[in-house]
Amino acid sequence: MLFNEDVFKRKSEHGGSIEVICGSMFSGKTEELIRRLKRGQIAKLSIEIFKPKKDTRYDETAIVSHDANSIKSTPVENSSSILLLGSNAAIVGIDEAQFFDEELPDVCTKLANKGIRVIVAGLDMDYTGKPFGPLPAIMAMAESVTKVHAVCVICGNPALYSYRLIENDTQILLGEKESYEPRCRRCFRLGKSVSA
């Protein structure tokens, strides 16, 4: 962790904030998170980055986008670890927020109230199109929300849904292109009849 007194002073004087980057699978959420965090690194700000320990799809510790861009992170079991480990940073990045526990909105608020810029990325809806995990609550409290869209693999329109391709009704199913595809509202509602 990079830390110096001037950076901490700057952070405290300007107040904190919560930014959310959300959207469907394959929409570029992690790519945008990495871009914002790397800009913080260029500015020589102290940064802590976290991801859920259970998400090991691309790497055990790094946050990795579908385009293979990556940045080192700390995998954690729960959101209270983020509060403990990120309290002295100027910027805290959190990826895959939907996989964290319901304490994450409170953790983000406490960090922002300490003057920290908190950037959170994740799915806003699950595979059924319903709000997913703690992210919708964080969106309600955030200073800014960026909703990114993928491209519908059926018709080419902007996609905001993550359509599950395999039969499994558990809410959390880690997977990639073999398990999910991005779809627009119409193609998501039409379901399997479109992809057959």
Image (spheres, helix red, strand yellow):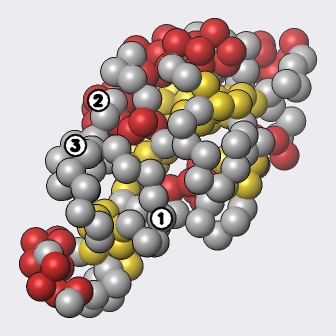
Per the image, label 1 sits on a secondary structure element best described as loop
Task: Say which amino acid is labelled 2.
Answer: Ala
Closest to the observer, 85 or 54: 54
- Residue 129: image x %, image y %? 18, 55
* Left or right relative to 170: residue 30: right
At 49% across and 42% down in the image, what residue appears?
96
Per the image, label 2 sits on a secondary structure element best described as helix
Q: Which mark is residue 131?
A: 3
- Residue 111: image x %, image y %? 55, 16
Closest to the observer, 25 or 1: 25
Separation (CA) of disc 1 from disc 2 = 25 Å
Separation (CA) of disc 1 from disc 3 = 20 Å
Closest to the observer, 168 or 133: 168
* Left or right relative to 11: residue 76: left
Viewer-nearest of discs 1 and 2: 1
Residue underneath mark 1: 176
Viewer-nearest of discs 2 and 3: 3
Task: Say which amino acid is labelled 1.
Answer: Glu
Asked whether the viewer can see residue 16, the reply is no
User: Which comes sooner in the sequence, label 1 or label 2?
Assistant: 2
